Amino acid sequence: MQSKPSIGFEPEWPAPPFVRALMTTRLGGVSKAPWNELNLGLLSGDKVSDVHQNRALVEQALGVPAVYMRQVHGTQGVAVTPSTPSNTEADVAWTTQAGVAFAIMAADCLPILVCHPTVKWVAGAHAGWRGLAGQEGHGVVETLAHSAKVHGVSPQDCVVWLGPCIGPTAFEVGEDVFAAFGSLLEKSDNPANLFVQASPNKYMANLAGLARERLKAAGFRSVHGNDSSLPWCTYRQETLYHSHRRDAVAKGGSGRMAAYIWITT
């Protein structure tokens, strides 16, 4: 991971020179505990003026304006332009326009970034388990694939990066989550890597692993970043990442990170 001092890091992936991306951590902002330090979530319970100051710090590092969506754990996508209003409801976004970034917010969910080696089209998705599972086989990954195809891009030619998320040693789920991925488990070459039964009705889920399976099924081949190992786990890496599951109840609040992607001019 290439570091961006005080703000976050740039993904290590074979993106073309005209694509830039940044993943923030919890370091480098002005928010006070329990949202300390760099919290980008306006609806997190943090002081609004602190969040706006944090966003301004990030945009200064980006060098371009950023659009923030209202993420609802759905599958809807939006084409981002410089005039796209912040708070537009969407969990998937894409743009073909240079000079505007968009943010994929997360605090345990998985941020997914996508680009193409030659076509000026970039996309991203907010992938919690609901967004990955979707409805009747259509989730955020399928929305990404559809956007790629609409823009004349084949998913198999794209480059994908997975950011930090809650890891498989911390993400305990119930039968509902396990059942939501039933068809995916049937097709998987290694279903034991995706869910480990912890008790009669509880499982430890591998969110990044599930995303990789959905991406593979949708035709995406070049996938980088989060490999489900401990350094990528938002829950376990408390000094580096916000975690809603770890902090929201125990500490009275949790901040938000964001993955940004944009096309340079």
Image: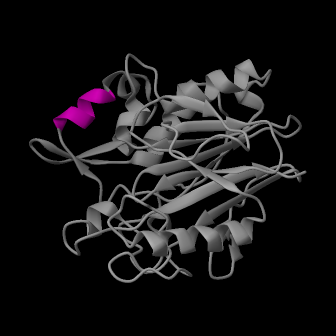
The residue depicted at 17 percent of the width and 35 percent of the height is: 175
Estimate the x, y position of residue 31 in percent, counting from the top left.
44, 80
Locate residue 153: give its quadrant: top right
At 43% from the left and 23% from the top, the residue drawn is 187
Q: Residue furthest left?
A: 200
Name the one closer to the observer, 106 or 86. Answer: 86
Classify residue 81 as left or right of residue 140: right
Residue furthest top in the image = 136
Image location (x, y in percent) of residue 142: 55, 25
**Does the segment drawn in magenta span residue 176?**
yes
Toward the viewer: 158 or 32? 32
Q: Position of residue 12 (x, y in %)?
A: 72, 60
Q: Tell me, yes or no, if residue 241 can be seen here.
A: no
**Residue situated in front as seen by the camera: 98 or 203:** 98
Q: Can residue 229 be seen in the rendering of this structure?
A: yes
The residue under the point 36% across, 70% down is 46
Magenta span: chief secondary structure: helix
Q: Is residue 107 above or below residue 38?
A: above
Give the x, y percent position of residue 139: 46, 27
Q: Which residues are magenta?
A: 175-181
Residue 107, magenta (yes or no): no
